[in-house]
Image (cartoon, rainbow, N blue to C red):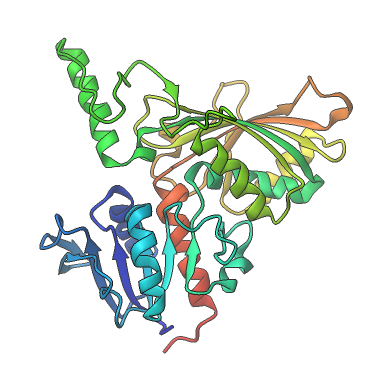
Amino acid sequence: MNNPPRLAIAGVTGAVGQEFLRILEQRDFPFASLKLIASARSAGKTITFKGETYTVEELTEDSFEGVDLALFSAGGSASKRFGPAAAAAGCVVVDNSSAFRMDPEVPLVVPEVNPEAAFEHKGIIANPNCSTIIMNVPVWPLHRLAGVKRVVVSTYQAASGAGAAAMAELEQQARDWVAGDPITQDIFGRQYVWNLFSHNSDIDPATGYNTEETKMIKETRKIFGTEDISVSVTCVRVPVLRAHCESVNLTFDREVSEAEVRVALAAAPGVSVIDDREANRHPEPLIASDEDDVYVGRIRRDLGQDGGVGIEMFIAGDQIRKGAALNAVQIAELLLERVPAS
């Protein structure tokens, strides 16, 4: 790979693709050239980035000739089709879809947790699911502290996880409700505003778990590099535009004090603690929106577990940033750290 790399963004017109551009500019990510790519319906559009105007090109198998590094957020089917073509052209792909996450040949990376895995790639690196990332940024330092045996997590997932169209529909539903008009229900097929419902991914009729829940279980074990961690998940959509929240209950190998947990979280990269019991100020979606860190609060012993081995906490993280675009850019930054500047 050249440093600075010849960079491409696939799926640039989507919510995560647009966030890629924001983060690349904010972090002053170096690049020698930039190619913006999307589906045929977006080809020909122009995007201004860092004072330059770029024309969006159609995503094809030939899009990655002369490209060193590609950030993908074009959807699973597009990643399966074009990711291997990009890798075959000598491009390193950081893919935001679910297409390669559980492929044993593809590293699944959260830079705060398993950065070294990024260098085991064979052309493709997978970005984990947004809820998995947001959970494990604070869980990992606690796992290192005392060994987490079990995680019980309930998610409160924003519209952003379903893309820009879902965010727009939530806004439209709010307008419909205020105006007394019929509620627009094109994305989820139900009223979203003033409501919440089980995550909209498919439910396995045999297990009762939906796809989002299964992702969190399997991906956590792969990222942590162990099957010896139990993860029980319930995923729910809530009428929030941006930033996911999660209620997390942990069981440790040994007794853990609240003070130990606070010290570990305060020192952890990518974590900010907001835990003001007196003012009842804790992580919220509006606090986490447009922020890089995962916010942690409501830290307390689980009084339902004997022996002091349980901890409860509540977390919030921006799904588009740390749950998607930022994590991918951080992976790209890791790769460049090992490549001498040209």
Q: Residue furthest front?
A: 206
Q: Decide if residue 28 is in sight here.
A: no
* Quadrant for the C terminus in the image: bottom left
Residue 317 at what x, y percent from top left?
49, 41
Quarter of image, res 299: top right
Q: Decide if residue 257 is in sight here.
A: yes
Above or below residue 83? Residue 225 is above
Quarter of image, res 197: top left
Q: Residue furthest top?
A: 180
Above or below residue 26? Residue 142 is above
Q: Nearer the viewer, residue 161 or 30?
A: 161
Above or below residue 312? Residue 38 is below
What's the residue at 54%, 26% (across, down)? 281
Above or below residue 27? Residue 301 is above
Q: Tag count in the figure?
A: 0
Q: Nearer the viewer, residue 182 or 303?
A: 182
Residue 286 at what x, y percent from top left?
41, 33
Q: Nearer the viewer, residue 263 or 79?
A: 79
On the picture, is 53 further left or further right than 240? left
Residue 129 at what x, y percent from top left?
49, 47
On the picture, is 207 further left or further right than 85? right
On the picture, is 335 further left or further right than 33? right
What's the residue at 54%, 43% (across, down)? 215
* Quadrant for the N terminus in the image: bottom left
Residue 225 at what x, y percent from top left?
70, 56
On the picture, is 189 further left or further right than 281? left
What's the residue at 63%, 61% (across, down)? 114
